[in-house]
Image: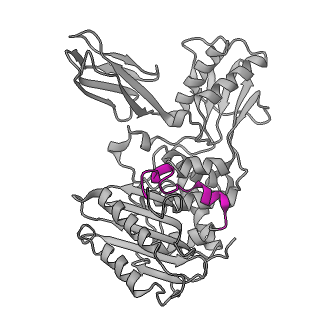
Amino acid sequence: MLAPLLCLVALAPLQAPASIRARLEKTLSAQALRPGLVGVRVVSLDTGKLLFERNSDKSLMPASNMKIVTCAATLALLGPSFTYTTGVYAVGDDLILKGSGDPSLDFARLQKLAEAVKAAGVTELKGKLLYDASVFDAEVLGEGWQWDDEEFSFSAQVSGLSCDENVAVVIVKPGAVGEAPLVEATPYFTIENKATTVDGKEQALSIGRKRGQNTVVITGKIGEKADAKRTALTVEDPARFAALRFAEALRTAGVTVPEDVVLESGKVPEGVTALTVTVSKPLSQLAADFMKPSDNLFGECFLKTLGAIKGKAGSTAEGAKVVREWLKSRSIPITGFYQADGSGLSRMNLVTAQLLMGILRDRAGDANFRAAMPIGGVDGTLKNRFKNTSAQNNVRAKTGTLTGASSLSGYVTSKAGERLVFSILMNHYDREAGASTARALQDALVLTLLDLPRKR
């Protein structure tokens, strides 16, 4: 593993040839970037020399480049073999489903748990179905998250007990003309169907969830010959939702569970042994599930897990403290750094290109960290970028997008065989030009880096 970066500021003078610098500067002078601020830093992993820099000490919104910080710290502090365990406990007539913060728990794994409960001799639930999410605190949304994003899947609530990423799908199909359309949804939702079925193939539906409620409102119209519309919506109180899904799994497994079974929050008493457990994939694989699709829930759960295991509490604030101390221990400068969440969804996050560069250099020898990164033209959020270029199947980098913020940081090998690490943070670029223009300019910068000569 490469040694930690001891002094980013002292890496001078710039080593990129004048011709390459001129191309980089021309890209950065694009009209779309003039209203905003761009931070860039490029370093050779082979020589440690600074090749190019622009505002790399300025604090900028990272968007999902914050995931680089969270993933690196989690892998380093918990180790690639770390796993989450979700258990079922029998206490009197009650069953308790206890979470450990696993963001990957899904209905398929709940079904396996239910089958194991049945195999253990439980044929009927006579008491309550309790759920224990106490590994994390009660804050389900991140600091500074947008209130009008709360119903969307990328803004799922965070819980110590999650299922299906705390999202449920609502399917709306045409009914008879003049009648309300047909709706398929989890019983966890209350449906207010105000839509109408009309002639033809028109589909003009609005499907949303009332803020703070599990009430879904459907308005508009759908043609009798139109395709069904599927919409994924977040749920309020994810732990209770997981318990409801577990009740469904128990019934499927042949365990008798009353339709009006009481679902309540509760804690597993000390000394009680689990009836059965389900274990997640190791962190080495969860890291890729986190980084490649840029999954926000994973980032929030990872950060709170750091707080629970390495800090004093399963909270975002405590996890951020753990991360900050880890950065200090690696001699990575933290000036200008503020971590509001684990995913980058908050606009209150602040990083510098220097800080991201420090992490990327420090983790360059961590095969699991590098493997978790999206690959240009191949997978994840880079699947459709860098295709048919020298960066395809070469660049490994994390993307990031918020309104007015776009980022790309990672690794690439030049045509001359030199290993490079780069960080590009773009804030407040022209809104009319949009994120697509910002991404195109990032790609242009990376493709220019590929032409760096070995001798300079």
At a point 55% along the width and 23% down the height, the residue shown is 244
At a point 46% along the width and 23% down the height, the residue shown is 188
Front one among 50 and 306: 50
Front one among 158 and 12: 12
Front one among 41 and 5: 41
The prevailing secondary structure element of the residues shown in magenta is loop
Q: Is residue 450 magenta?
A: no
Determine the image quadrant of residue 406.
bottom left
Report the side of 220 relative to 211 (left or right).
left
**Any part of residue 311 in sight:** no
**Residue 160 % position (x, y):** 59, 41
- Quarter of the image for the N terminus: give it: bottom right
Report the side of 35 relative to 321 (left or right).
left
**Any part of residue 420 in sight:** yes
Up the image or down, 430 lies above or below 415; here it is above
Up the image or down, 114 lies above or below 146; here it is above
**Residue 247 % position (x, y):** 60, 20
Find the magenta span and give its range. 365-387
Up the image or down, 400 lies above or below 86; here it is below
